[in-house]
Amino acid sequence: MFESIILFAPFIGTSIAVGLILWAAHMLLIKKWSELGSERMFSRQLAMLGLTLLGILFIIFVLPINQSSRNQLISLFGILISAVIALSSTAIISNLMAGVLLRMTKPFKVGDFVRIGGHVGRVTERGLFETEIQTEMRELISIPNTYCISNPLATIQSSGTIISASLSLGYEINHHRVEELLIEAAKDCGLTEPFVHILELGNFAVTYRLSGFLEEAKRHISMQSKLYGCVLDTLHQQNIEIMSPSYMNQRQVQEGASIIPATTRVTAPAADEVTSAEELGFDKAEQAEQLENEKLKLNKEIDRLKNTIKKASSEEDKKNRLDILEKKRADLELLEKVSNNVEE
């Protein structure tokens, strides 16, 4: 009996030690940071999985069995892990690995405008296997993560973007005048640092591209439409027709008639009565971005409070800071619930 206890002592001791280490790791990596969202918790869960597998290997190494049986157990453990991966769908594993890669490279975040292949919209969710974007038509599109990393991915910077408008005008109009008028249209539209490029000298017309910097990148869809309108107004006011000289009108019109609509004054609606395309189309993306920013802000405040608690000048000061910390954690937990409801 005593010999059996001595024989199994290393195994029992190692099992207890591994269990305690895994419990401590769970408390430090998972339990202590329960207020974190699934995105920030993902790396900690992966670390916990790795520690668990490593602990199982340690327990196998100290089993009171001969070397041959130990090698067989290790081989069986490896086969089980391989079987789990092999039996799982290749697409699932590929998307999971792609999700890990997207978290490492961080090409976009929730709320960003992205163009992935032929899909354009704002990111509403970044999942382990897929990324969800919302289009300007309020459609929610789930894109597999493998598609995100295997297709060109463009992200509009939140600090600003460049919007453009292209048009063709005849050779009879001096290009210096055209450039001056187009830049004036861009300024009227509210763009900064406008510039004009001549893209092509065609057989019948010159193709121009007007570009300008927009600081509020979220409004680029509405501003694109507004830019077209400003170009129309500016050129029509100068009696410049936006059409190729090869245009043929088979309707009978008076000689010298201009195909430019008459200018009419329309009373513009009040600013608070106008609904922009972005507000209507990207409601979920906007809400998801606001929640994400609030969670990041609260997490920073929680980290700051944890550091200041150690430097408290008195017990009363420490208690006050702990109360504030608990309140911040409660606010973060509430935001997590709201965020989960939005995702559902």
Image (spheres, helix red, strand yellow):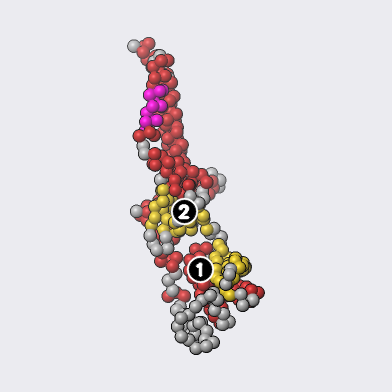
Q: In this rendering, would 128 be left or right of 195?
A: left
Q: Residue at x 44, y 69 (%)?
A: 276
Q: Quadrant of residue 46?
A: top left
Q: Which amino acid type is shown beneath numbered disc 2?
A: Gly
Quadrant location, the N terminus: top left
Please report contact status of discs 1 and 2: CB closer than 8 Å, yes or no. no
**Extreme-bottom residue of the structure:** 254
Q: Give 75 or 118, whichever is nearer the viewer.
A: 118
* Residue 87 placement, left or right of 175: left
Is residue 175 part of the magenta span, yes or no? Answer: no
Residue where numbered disc 1 is placed: 224
Q: Does any portion of residue 317 appear in the rendered image? A: no
Q: Main secondary structure of the magenta part?
A: helix
Q: Count of labels shown?
A: 2
Q: Which residues are magenta?
A: 74-84
Q: Amino acid at mark 1?
A: Gln
Residue 127 lies, in percent from the top left, at 41, 48
- The residue drawn where x is 44% and y is 60% is 286
Q: Return the disc, 1 or 2, that comes first in the chain's sequence.
A: 2
- Residue 117 marker: 2
Secondary structure state at the residue bearing disc 1: helix
Crowding around mark 1 (Cα neighbors within 10 Å: few <14, some 14 to 19, many 20+) is some
Residue lying at 52% horizontally and 58% vertically, measured from the top left = 156
Residue at point 52%, 63% (across, down):
217
Q: Mark 1, mark 2: which one is toward the viewer?
A: 2
Q: Is residue 76 magenta?
A: yes
Q: Is residue 1 visible?
A: yes
Question: In the orientation shown, which residue stands out farthest toward the right?
Answer: 176
Measured from the top left, where is residue 311 in percent x and y? 56, 46
- Counting from the top left corner in percent of width and height, residue 306 is at 51, 46
